[in-house]
Image (cartoon, rainbow, N blue to C red):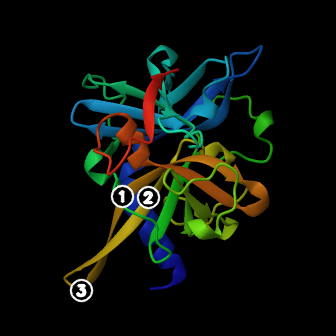
């Protein structure tokens, strides 16, 4: 298999969950336009829906929205939003905001999330594992984007896991976060084509999948597991940081921690 074939196979393993990622839009001051601010990740568990994004992307007073269809949007429900706060002293800000809905989405607007069975709550990072980051990238001219972006295209980036002992970033804690090396060469569309003119800053709130491999009838199969929610991009070092989904769902009381609870969900 060629490198390009490998990239295509990896991103296509994630593509069934494309609808789980929605563009996050902020109102443009003084106009009715929208500005791309980041990404919302949708997780579903039966009738329960969890909307996850980077807290920094929705904590300004500007109203925020996320895409439902190319012709519609839903306002980010600030009054129902919770943020993750440290339950132990010395932990960094997890920078994650969560909205939980326990009602079935009768209109289908919150359908198509990442199934809870694909949450990699017990997966640890490894340089031998393939990782794919997903979100809505901006361009260098992000601040000039004053139009509605519901037709924005998501981007896939093959990223390289960085072992914790090699990470020297302020407020990085491997119990809480995972770190990945990002490169322009690793960017791809859902078809596996190279993406140009995109910047990962708008991917805040998007997801990182660890791609498992197995063989069936001689074919190599790929299975994605959501392991983190993107919260930071350090441009000078081309590093992406993601908060572990284990910490998020521990805080929501949906995953039993192995030790002390690291975070708790608090009202915004």
- Left of 262 or right of it: where is 25? right
Dot 1 and dot 3 residues touching (CB under 8 Å):
no
Q: x and y percent of residue 39 in the render? A: 55, 39
The answer to which of 163 and 233 lies nearer the viewer is 163
- Residue at x 56% of width, y 43% of height: 91
Q: Residues within 10 Å of mark 2 (few under 14, many from 20)?
A: many
Q: Secondary structure at mark 2?
A: strand
Q: x and y percent of residue 22 in the render? A: 49, 38
Sequence order check, earlier mark of 2 and 3: 2
Q: Which residue is mark 1?
A: 225
Q: Residues within 10 Å of mark 3 (few under 14, many from 20)?
A: few
Q: x and y percent of residue 258 in the render? A: 32, 51
Q: Which residue is mark 3?
A: 218
Q: Secondary structure at mark 3?
A: loop
- Residue at x 41% of width, y 43% of height: 19
Circle on res. 209: 2
- Left of 76 or right of it: where is 61? right
């Amino acid at each position: 298999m060629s490198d390009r074939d490998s990239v295509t196979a990896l991103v296509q393993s994630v593509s069934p969950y494309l609808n789980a990622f929605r563009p996050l839009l902020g109102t443009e001051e003084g106009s009715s336009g929208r500005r791309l601010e980041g990404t919302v990740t949708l997780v579903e568990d039966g009738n329960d829906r969890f909307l996850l994004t980077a807290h920094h992307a929705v904590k300004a007073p500007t109203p925020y929205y996320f895409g439902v269809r190319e012709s519609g949007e839903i306002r980010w429900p600030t009054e129902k939003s919770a943020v993750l706060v440290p339950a132990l002293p010395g932990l960094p800000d997890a920078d994650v905001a969560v909205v939980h809905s326990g009602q079935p989405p009768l209109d289908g607007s919150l359908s198509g999330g990442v199934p809870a069975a694909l949450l990699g709550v017990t997966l640890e990072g490894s340089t031998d594992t393939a990782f794919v980051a997903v979100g809505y990238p901006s361009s260098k001219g992000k601040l000039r984007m004053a139009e509605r972006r519901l037709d924005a295209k998501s981007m896939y980036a093959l990223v390289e896991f960085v072992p914790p002992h090699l990470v020297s970033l302020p407020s990085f804690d491997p119990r809480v976060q995972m770190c990945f090396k990002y490169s322009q060469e690793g960017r791809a569309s859902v078809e596996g084509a190279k993406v140009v003119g995109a910047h990962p800053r708008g991917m805040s709130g998007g997801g990182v999948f660890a791609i498992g491999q197995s063989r069936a009838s001689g074919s190599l199969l790929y299975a994605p597991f959501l392991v983190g929610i993107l919260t930071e991009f350090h441009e000078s070092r081309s590093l992406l940081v993601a908060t572990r989904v284990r910490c998020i769902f521990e805080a929501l009381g949906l995953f039993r921690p192995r030790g002390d609870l690291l975070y708790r969900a608090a009202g915004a």
